[in-house]
Amino acid sequence: MSIAASVNRIIDRTPTGRIFGYELFPQYRESPGAVVRAVNRGVDTGRLERIEKGRFYKPRSGVLGDVPVSDEERLRDALYRNGRRVGYVTGPALYNRLGLTTQVPKTVAIAVNRATQTKDLGTIRMKLLSRRAPISDSTVPLLEILDILRDARRVPDANVERVIQGMSKRLTELTSTELKRLQQFALDYYNPATRALLGMLLTRCQKEVLPTLKASLNPTTRFDLGIDPNEWPESRAWNIR
């Protein structure tokens, strides 16, 4: 079977409205030029629509013509590639999903392991934020906690104490292995204030704190987060106020 025929067969099996790229075609690794030409022919004939460079979908016809690709599908395409997690929602959209704020952002921030980029796609605006921490289904819940601790003072319509109370609850739901991994991510990818706040919450929850977490902090540095030391006595040991 020719490469063009193989590409067409895969396109036939692809659901309408599903965004895909050249990675959908196994032949792309060996014969990228032939795959690109076959896909481009699909665009030229109207069988496919190009949504952006290297990303395509099969349009679905409606009463008023072709139905635009859904916002949910655009978001899915930013979060997953070939069934593998490659990004996660962070920032205000994450705070809203977890009930930390009622504000609904106009731009959805997505953490990815590639370059920062803003995509204005008409009905949805996405900002891809470059992150170094490894992104997978197992790491995302941990990275969400660390992102919120890092941004604790910037959550709209929420005070810091309410935010960290919510994160304390999430810490109690993690296994000891996950807690160690969480602390290692904090050490490798997050700032001192985030590490100090994590240490304080782990202490409060009576969870094991890695010695390296405390050792990574300058003992003369103070972190001003606006919390009440009487309500959070553990804050003193972590130089948080």
Image (cartoon, rainbow, N blue to C red):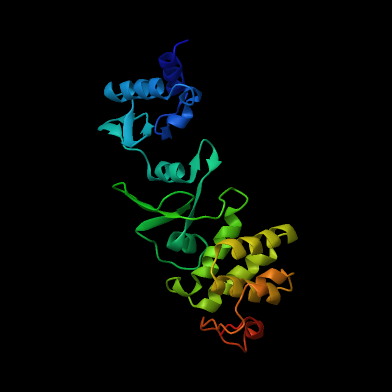
Task: Examine the rendered structure and indicate whether residue 119 appears above or below residue 229.
Answer: above
Above/below status of 1 relative to 228: above
Q: Nearer the viewer, residue 206 or 156?
A: 206
Q: Residue furthest bottom?
A: 230
**Residue shown at the point (69%, 69%) measured from the top left:** 212
- In the image, what residue occupies the spot 52% across and 69% down? 150
Q: Quadrant of residue 204?
A: bottom right
Q: Where does the image place residue 85, in percent across and percent down from the top left?
A: 54, 44
Q: Nearer the viewer, residue 156 or 193?
A: 193
Q: Quadrant of the C terminus?
A: bottom right
Residue 233, quarter of the rendered image:
bottom right
236 vs 95, left or right, is right
Up-down: is 84 above or below 169? above
Instruction: Give how far across and how far down residue 60 sits, in percent.
Output: 35, 30
**Which residue lies at the image location 60% right of the left edge and 64% below the top edge?**
186
The percent coordinates of residue 123 (x first, y second) are 31, 48
Determine whether, in the image, residue 176 is placed left or right of residue 42: right
Q: Is residue 146 left or right of residue 8?
A: right
Camera-nearest residue between 123 and 125:
125
Residue 133 x %, y %: 55, 55
Please, is residue 69 above or below residue 131 in the view? above
Corner quadrant of residue 181 = bottom right
Residue occupying image coordinates x 58% and y 48%: 136
